[in-house]
Amino acid sequence: MILTFDIGTTAVKASLFDESLAALASASVEYGLVTEKSLEVELDPETYWAGMKSCVARLLESRPEARDAVRGIGITTQGETLIPVDGEGRALRRAIVWLDGRAVEESARIRSIFGEAEFYAKTGIPDCNGLCPVSKLLWLKDRESELYRATRKFLLLEDYVIFRLTGRFVTEKSLLSTTGYFDIAEDRLWGDMFARIGVDGGKIPETLECGSVAGTILPEVAEELGLGPGAAVVTCAMDQTAGAVGAGNIEAGCMAETTGTALSIAVSCRSPDLRHPSRLTVYRHAFQGGYLYMPICMTAGIALKWFKDEFCPDLIAEAASKGVSVYDLMGEEAGTAAAGSGGLLLLPYLAGVTQPDNNPAAKGVFFGVGLDTKRRHFIRAIFESVAFMLRENLELVESVTGQRVETIRSLGGGSKSGLWSQIKADATGKTITTMAESECASLGAAILVAVALGLYPSLAAAARVSNGAKASYSPNPEAHAAYGGGYARYKKLYARVKDLF
């Protein structure tokens, strides 16, 4: 068996796959973030580890034979979350989560050294802002100097988990590609960045290729997790890139969207234009020579989770009593509202916006609330706002690549909702195809592990046999025409209020 961990912003999921890459079982645990100060988002790293242990315990309850059957372990995580550790691998502070935008002044200093065009040409990142790990490294160096000096390695989340499992300080290139200190064109750490901002590049762990065996699980860690000894731990890829692998989004021109915590759009390519004036985000793919155009929208599913937590206690209780997903109940309620949500619009920028505009200061806005507005309208407006973000960024991708997209592979937790998938099809005018295995990040990690263990000759070969289409949603012409007006208002609304942020 193969065991994978998909560690997201607000939940960790563990999954078991057999050697044919069929999913056998999964378990997940949610957790909250620490947001005590404006722009700051943190979490105790032990929270991630505790969630992993809890998930494995649940898996072993349902599949006790997995204890001695796991031969490979893969980890895919959110990108950009930063954890400083000492020489023993102990975290020196809470993790600085990727949503954290505190390093505003530091990012401005970096921009004064490297212009936007040079920064994009090197990193594939449109702009160095307070969210970038490189800005946070400089923030730690300047604001927590004693901690900086005590830090042996600055680990990203996948790196931290690999260390906990193997005792090795390593990282991988897909995960590094969103840090601001990885040269995506040269496929290596950007030494000039470290030199010119005065940060010690030696504090970054050894860089491995995606799909490399990082080591064997430590015996005491295997015992702590309840697993047998000897499993290989494999470097995988950040969650968005792993999702692309799991969806078979490997060949140039393939497109997928993932509605998870954030909304991401992935278009595989071989030769990205790192001089294009639109500066569309480019990631390094999970294999050498591959890239992904990757527009990222900071809030998607997390906006639905926020609304659930703050305004749906009755649905949470009902879901618990019935043993169903609270999100299914929210979807049922949203389905009782007509397309257009009674005129209610949401700008879903609860954590800023990066593309197609770059405005970290942006906030969420509900517009068009009336005395007749019900909760179902708010829930549906969240669904529709994500569909509008998808359309806006698809139009940007098509303009940059010169390719017209007809079908979009839909991944992530949001793809489980038939209503949401139909809204996306109607809003974009594209066919939305959901995958048989919707949690493609976990599958992508399993594929990388399987190839590393020699079970398949290549990622493409493994992807061909491991996933297929589940359902297809064609756009309704009348609904698409109706959403055209809402989309136009959505774009006008942002243009009118952006300066107020």
Image (cartoon, rainbow, N blue to C red):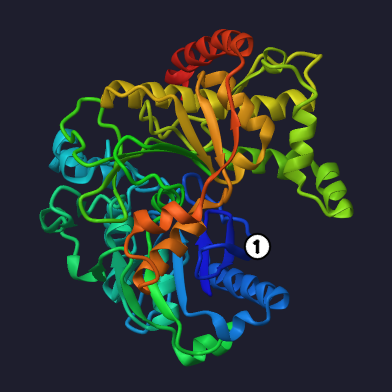
Residue 10 in the image: state x and y as whole percent. 58, 54
Instruction: Judge by depth and name the residue closer to the eye, 449 or 48.
Output: 449
- Pointer 1 local density, CA inside 10 Å: few below 14, some 14–19, many at least 20: some
Drawn side of residue 463 relative to residue 108, left or right: right
Drawn side of residue 379 relative to residue 56, left or right: right
Q: Residue at x 27, y 27 (%)?
A: 401
Identified by mark 1, the residue type is Val
The answer, for residue 142, to whether it is visible in the render is yes
Quarter of the image where one finds residue 32: bottom right
Residue that carries the numbered disc 1 in the rendered image: 29
The answer, for residue 364, to whether it is visible in the render is no
Q: Residue at x 49, y 90 (%)?
A: 229
147, above or below 263, in the image: below
Where disc 1 sits, the SS reads: strand
Residue 286 in the image: state x and y as whole percent. 32, 55
Residue 233 in the image: state x and y as whole percent. 41, 76
Residue 451 in the image: state x and y as whole percent. 36, 67
Q: Residue at x 20, y 38 (%)?
A: 120
Q: Residue at x 16, y 39 (%)?
A: 121
Instruction: Judge by depth and name the residue closer to the eye, 111 or 59.
Output: 59
338, above or below 442, in the image: above
